[in-house]
Amino acid sequence: MSGAGDLDVPISLCRVQSNRTHSGYVADGLPWVAQKTVQRIDQLEKDARATQADYDAGNDDNYNAGICGVYDGLRATVERAVEEWVFRGVVVRHRDYINLKDLRLVAAVTVTHCERLQKLFQRCCEITQAHDRSGLRSFGVPRPDEALADLAELRAVVEELKNLQKAIPT
């Protein structure tokens, strides 16, 4: 993928999957864990829009599960954005080396970018089902439009970093 990207050669990605009894099923695209930030944001926007029907119908249990799932994915995607766009792949989890080739691109990151990402990450942590909330604390989940606004905020940070990093001379 990186070689094709360096040469501007288009590629088509697919994956081989298995179920409980068979393997060898071919599917388009990459699994969630291998997707880049923007691909994940696109999927999460679709997922957030899909919660609208339950929200409108007052199916609160289904809606809460759906929107919390969106925020679980958003939290993970903020982490991916930090790895991909803040640290520009210089430091990648579980990799045996540090890639100093793109270190100069890290200079585009401002304190404001960090604050925006931290605020978004904290919002996700308050909503995610990974944490057990106190039953005494009132808790309301965001509306679908609020989830879409949070996703738009992450997309905006990524786009700003992308544009600032493009302007850094090589």
Image (cartoon, helix red, strand yellow):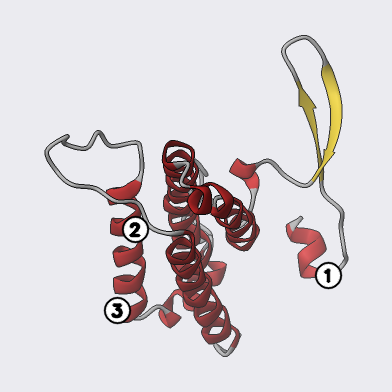
Does residue 36 lie above or below 151 as drawn?
Answer: above
Q: Nearer the viewer, residue 105 or 12?
A: 12
* Residue that extends furthest to the left in the rendered view of this protein: 136
Mark number, residue 111: 3
The Cα–Cα distance between marks 1 and 2, rounded to whole angstroms, is 35 Å
Q: Secondary structure at mark 3?
A: helix
Residue 132 on image: x %, y %: 25, 33
Residue 122 on image: x %, y %: 28, 57
Residue 59 on image: x %, y %: 47, 41
Q: For marks 3 and 2, give the one nearer the viewer.
A: 2
Q: Is residue 63 left or right of residue 38?
A: left
The Cα–Cα distance between marks 3 and 2, rounded to whole angstroms, is 15 Å
Residue for point 42% across, 80% down: 107
Q: Amino acid at mark 3?
A: Val
Q: Quadrant of residue 111?
A: bottom left
Residue for point 72% across, 12% down: 20
Which residue has dot 2 on it? Answer: 121
Q: Nearer the viewer, residue 170 or 116?
A: 116
Q: Earlier in the sequence, mark 3 or mark 2?
A: 3
Q: Amino acid at mark 1?
A: Leu
Q: Nearer the viewer, residue 2 or 22?
A: 22
Q: For marks 3 and 1, give the one nearer the viewer.
A: 3
Q: For marks 1 and 2, give the one nearer the viewer.
A: 2
Q: Quadrant of the N terminus?
A: bottom right
Q: Secondary structure at mark 1?
A: loop
Residue for point 51% across, 54% down: 56
Q: Secondary structure at mark 2?
A: helix
Q: Quadrant of residue 44?
A: bottom right
Does residue 31 lie above or below 87 as drawn?
Answer: above
Which residue has dot 1 on it? Answer: 7
